[in-house]
Image (cartoon, rainbow, N blue to C red):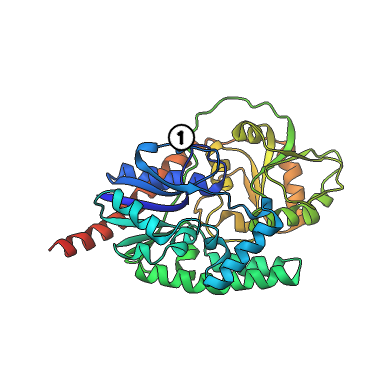
Amino acid sequence: MHLLFATSIVPDGALASGYEIANAAIIDALRRAGARVTVMGFIWPGKTPSDPQNTIVLDAVEVRTESAPALQKLIWLGKAVVSGLTFSSVKLRVVSDADVRAAIDNAGPFDGYVLNSVQFAGAFEKVLADRPSIFVAHNVEHRSAEENAAAAGSAFQRWLFRREARLLEVMEERLCRVARFVFTLAEEDRAALGVASGDRSAVLPLVTRAEAPTNKGLRRIDFDAALIGTWTWQPNRIGLDWFLTKVVPHLRPDFRIRIAGSMPSGVTSTHPGVQFVGRVPDAQAFVRGAAVIPLISTAGSGVQLKTIETFELGLPCVATSRSLRGIGYRPQNCVVTDDPVAFASALEAAAADIRDADGSAFHRRQVRALDAAIGLGLEKLGAVRREVAA
């Protein structure tokens, strides 16, 4: 079976975000199941695809809103309003439908599409309607947009997110209805998207690495707590704001917190132990240098890849209940609480008594469940192909 994996950004090997880590896990699982996978989409400027022989690059694009000039944001907004597309999809309209169609034709014969999230599928929906498809819903995007609107700091931002939410809800409903099968990354997302039936969807348990991590022995602890993420993404920003304003004030002054990753303007903390360290050369080494990992999601849908990575590495953690969505397993060294005072107390206790766990069993369990779910979707798509051939 030959599948065309249509995605906004093609893999370049960097795995710099949860989205890219999830994509790598899904593509690997499709190939383990015996499918030939050709990836089609855009690439970050200056990057090259990690698997060029099986990748179609439509163009290089820079679609990060937070770093775009004000004029570019206005251009995107104007095009979105005129076209009726979402703000996120219109950013990808740097090539025409005809260009995408030509790229698809050049890919050779294939059996169906894997529509990876709504951004690319929404930008070129008409072009991608000529073959059976599997839809991968990384999140319930319209719910995330509604939460972003509620947390927005200005009337204009609230209007923009509410517009996104309205359009995304319609688009997600249509993509799920047309798809032969739907993959979500969290169990609750199946019902939220109206595809809770086992004949219509399955959850993809993810991993953040191809091989199970090995126990590296005693760790060197450089600070008490570490957080890393793309904080410019609004659901992540909401969680970070909660942590800094609600939890951190209850931590003792000498509790050392390091926060890595892209940081939006205006994020500060008066706590003397908080340091913002920007990009780090080795994300795994960075988190392994912490006594405990705070898992601080309070918004969004889908699965938290940072939670999965923390469990794979066996690191002690304190998590909100939202951070465990999509994961049916909690190790003994993970404390769960949504109360800020209890969260701070649990962080201090974990840092004072470090208890690592063996994460390799969790990794192996995730891979087995991921492969089983992928098999269900491919069987559904294969049945459709056989019906068409007959």
- Residue 124 in the image: above or below residue 351: below
- Residue 251 in the image: above or below residue 72: above
The quadrant in which residue 116 appears is bottom left
Pick the front one: 167 or 377? 167
The quadrant in which residue 57 appears is top left
In the rendering, at what x and y percent does residue 27 appear?
39, 45
- Picture residue at 61% right of the left edge, 52% below the top: 64
- Picture residue at 87% right of the left edge, 41% below the top: 272
User: How many numbered callouts?
Assistant: 1
Task: Spot the residue most to the left.
Answer: 390
In the rendering, at what x and y percent does residue 284 appear?
60, 34
Q: Secondary structure at mark 1?
A: loop
In the rendering, at what x and y percent does residue 355 appear?
64, 36
Residue 366 appears in the figure: no
Left or right: residue 390 versus residue 201 is left
Pick the front one: 95 or 109? 95
Pick the front one: 338 or 153? 153
Left or right: residue 293 versus residue 180 is right
Left or right: residue 7 versus residue 162 is left
- Residue 288 in the image: above or below residue 8: above
Residue 370 appears in the figure: yes
- Picture residue at 57% right of the left edge, 67% below the top: 79
The quadrant in which residue 101 appears is bottom left
- Picture residue at 72% right of the left edge, 70% below the top: 156
State which quarter of the image contains the C terminus: bottom left
Location of mark 1 (residue): 212
Pick the front one: 110 or 275? 110
In the rendering, at what x and y percent does residue 179 appear?
35, 66
Q: Amino acid at mark 1?
A: Ala
Mark 1 residue crowding within 10 angstroms, few (<14) / some (14–19) / many (20+): some
